[in-house]
Amino acid sequence: MTDLAPTPVLVSLVQASAGLAMFLFVLPAGVLADVLDRRRVLLASQLWLMVSAVVLGLLTVTGGTTPALLLVFTFLMGTGGALMQPAWRAVLPELVPQRQLPAAIDLVGLGVNLARAVGPAAGGLLVAGAGAGAAFLLNAVTYLGVVTVVAGWKRPIATGAGPAEQFVGALRAGIRYARHTPQMNAVLVRLGLFVLPASALWALLPLIARVELGTDAAGYGWILAAFGLGAVTGALTLGRLRERLSLDRIATTGTLFFGSAMIGIAFVRLWPAFLVLSWIAGIGWLHILTTLNTAAQTVLPGWVRARGMALFVLVFFLASTLGSMLWGAVASQIGLTVTIVLAGVAVIVGTGARYRFRIKNTVGLDLAPTRHWPAPTVAEPIEPEEGPVLVSVGYQVDPGKLREFEVAMSDLRRRRRRSGAYFWDLFVDSADPDRHIEVFMVDSWAEHLRQHERVTALDRVAESRVQACLVEGEYPRVQHFLASRGWRSRLRPRKETSSG
C-alpha cells in the first residue's frame, strides 16, 4: 500500500480491513469450532487462505492490483483467519496435558515469533528483488504444508449424551459463559486496553520506516525481524519469569516495556537504536499477549473453549481495527511523532486497570466434566426442544451459617449462569427464614441435559460449600418444571384442550 497509495489513512486501512473481517466472523467461527469437528474447520480455513493468496499473487504479478483490490483481498484473508483462529487456539489443550499448557502456549509463541523474525526479513528481500506478487504466491505455497499436517491429524471426536447445540443457542451460551466468568472479564478488559493504543505502532510503522527513516521494504522487514527477535527473547524468558512472578505482574511489566519502547521509537532516528527499541517492544508484546492467552485458555472448559477464544480474538481485532483507524486519522492531523507518543502514554496508563481487573493464576484448574448430577426423573420421554425449563433446589440452612451460605450461593449463581442458565434467583420461605429455594431457568430440555454434562470438579467443590451450610442430615432437593405450553396439551386428550 505504501507503493500504491502512501497516505496514513489507506496504509492504516490495510490492517483495519483484516480486523473488520475478524470482527464480523470470528465469533460465529468460534461457535462452529465448538459445535463441529475442529479439524475440518481448520482444513476449510487453510484452503480458503491458500486460494485467496494465489489470486492476490496472480493479480499483483500481472499488475492488476489496485488499492481497493488490495483491501478486498486483505479482508478475504482476514475472513480465513477468522475461521481459523478459534479452532487453532482451542485444539492446543487437546494436544498436551493441563500442567504443560502454559509451556505449550509459550512454545507456540516462540514458533510464531521465530517466523515473525525470519519471515518479514526474507519477505522484504523478496519484495525488493522480485516484487510483492512473488511474496504473495510463496505465501500461498506455505499453506500446503499446514493442510498436509492437519489432514493427517487423527483427532478423537468427543461425543456427549445430549443433542448437539444449535448455532444461535451455542452463540448465546458462549457469551453467557464469558460474561459470568470474572477471570475472562479481566482478560478481555486488559487485552482491549492494551491493544487499542498499541495498534498505533502496527498501523503507522510502515510510514515511520519510509518517511522518518527513509528505508525501503527490505529495511521494514529488518525492523519487523528485530521485533520478532524480541518476541523470541520474551518467549525464552517467560517460563522462568512465571516461576518468580504472578501472571498479573508479568502482564503489567510487559505492557510497560511496550509503551516505553513506543515512546522511544517516536523520537529515535538512528538505525541501530531503532532496532533495539523494536526488540524491546517485541519482548513486551510477547509477555503481555502470551500471559493473557494463558489466563484465558486455563479458565475455559472444553465445551466452550473455541467460543471463549473467539471472544479473545474478537476483542484483539476489534481494538486493533478501531485503533488503526483512530490513530491513522490522528496522525493525518498532528503527525506521526506526536501520535506515537500519545499512544505509548495511553499504553502505560492502561496498566492502572490491574487494580480493578487483576489477572489471577488459573493454571492447573480442573475443568474436566464430572457428570455427577443424577439424571432428572421424568414421567414420560421429553422432546429435546421442550422448554424453557425451570429447576428449583431447596435448602434447609443452618441458622448459624447463613452468611457462609449467602457467599457460597453467590459463587454458585455464577456457575449456574456459565453452564447455561439465563435466569437465576434465590428465595426465602416467608414461614421459615431458614428455608431457601434456588431457582434457575434454561432455554430447553436439551440445554439442561447439556448443563448436566458441563459440570466440572470446581463446580462440585462450590456445591459442597453450599452443602456444608445446611442443617445436618439435610440435602438439596431438586425439582424440574417445564413450561406448560405444549407440555400439558401432550398429556391431555385433544378434546379437553382449551381453545383459549
Image (cartoon, rainbow, N blue to C red):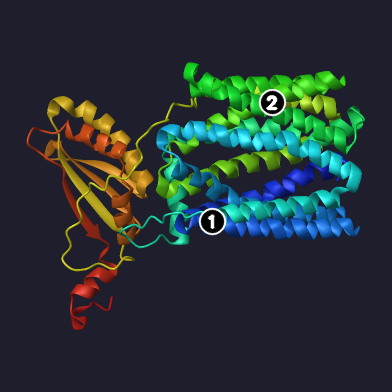
Viewer-nearest of discs 1 and 2? 1
The quadrant of the image that shows the C terminus is bottom left
Q: Is residue 179 left or right of residue 2?
A: left
Give how far across and how far down residue 49 sits, in percent.
68, 56
* Mark 2 residue crowding within 10 angstroms, few (<14) / some (14–19) / many (20+): many
Q: Nearer the viewer, residue 436 or 74?
A: 74
Q: Measured along the vertical axis of the image, is residue 299 above or below residue 445?
A: above
Q: Locate residue 284: give its quadrant.
A: top right
Q: Is residue 259 left or right of residue 241?
A: right
Q: Nearer the viewer, residue 124 or 187?
A: 124
The residue indicated by pointer 1 is: 152
Give how far across and how far down residue 401 sits, in percent.
17, 26
Image point (26%, 54%), residue name: 390
Image point (83%, 34%), residue name: 220
Give how far across and how far down residue 104 sits, in percent.
51, 35
| Amino acid beneath label 2 | Gly
State how far apart marks 1 and 2 are (Cα). Answer: 33 Å
Quick check: marks 1 and 2 in contact, CB under 8 Å?
Answer: no
